[in-house]
Amino acid sequence: MRTRTLAATLFLLAGLTGCGSNGGDDAKPAAKPTPTVNPDQQFITAVRARAFESWNDKGPTDEELAPYPAQWCAELQAGHSVDYLLSLQGANLYPIGMGWGTAKPDAQELVVLGVESHCPALRAQVTQELRDSGGY
C-alpha cells in the first residue's frame, strides 16, 4: 500500500513539475493588438484641435474637409509641389467651400496635417518646401 501511495505521489509530483517547467519564466505576454487609426479621423481630430482663425466666422464641415488629404497626397506623390496643390492653375485643391474660406498660412498648415495623417513619408519634403518658400 505504501508503495502504491508513494508511486502515486511521485507520479502526481512529476506531472505537476512537468506542467510548470519553463511556463512562467519563458512565457511571453500576449501581444496587444495595435489599434488601427483611421487617417480621415486622425486628420479631422488634428484640424479641430488646431481651431484655425480663418474659420472663426464659418468653417468647413468634416465632410467638406475629409477628401482633401488623399487628393493632396496623390498630387504630391505624382511629384507636384504644395504651391501647385493650392493653385487655381494647378491642382485647385485649395481648402475653400461655399460660405467658408481658409487663409493661405492656414491652408499650408492644413496640407501638413493632411500629409501627417495620410502620407507621413512625405512630411519632411512638404515642410522643407514650405520653409523654403517662407510659409512654414
Image (cartoon, helix red, strand yellow):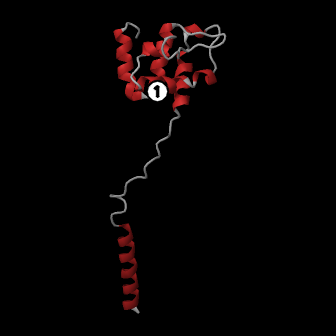
* Left or right: where 77 falls relative to 51: left
Mark 1 residue crowding within 10 angstroms, few (<14) / some (14–19) / many (20+): some
| Quarter in which the N terminus is drawn | bottom left
Q: Which quadrant of the figure has residue 66? A: top right
Q: Is residue 110 above or below residue 32?
A: above
Q: Position of residue 53 (x, y in %)?
A: 56, 8
User: Residue drawn at (40%, 84%), measured in percent from left and top?
Assistant: 8
Identify the residue at image location x=34%, y=10%: 132
Q: With respect to residue 68, does 57 lie above or below?
A: above
Residue 49 percent location from the top left of the image: 54, 19
Going by the numbered disc 1, the residue's amino acid type is Ala
The image quadrant that residue 68 belongs to is top right
Find disc 1 in the rendering and name its residue.
Answer: 74
Q: Position of residue 22 (x, y in %)?
A: 33, 63
| Residue depicted at 34% across the width and 16% down the height | 128
Q: Along the line of sight, which residue is nearer the eye, 82 or 10?
A: 82
Q: Nearer the viewer, residue 120 or 86?
A: 86
Quick check: 49 left or right of 30? right
Residue 34, percent across and down?
46, 42
As drawn, the residue found furthest toward the right would be 99
Q: Residue at point 36% right, 11% down?
A: 131
Q: How many marks?
A: 1
Residue 9 vs residue 65, the one in the foreground = 65
Q: Farthest bottom residue?
A: 1
Question: What kind of element bears circle 1?
Answer: helix
The quadrant in which the C terminus is found is top left
Please determine whether, in this image, residue 107 is positioned above or below residue 8: above
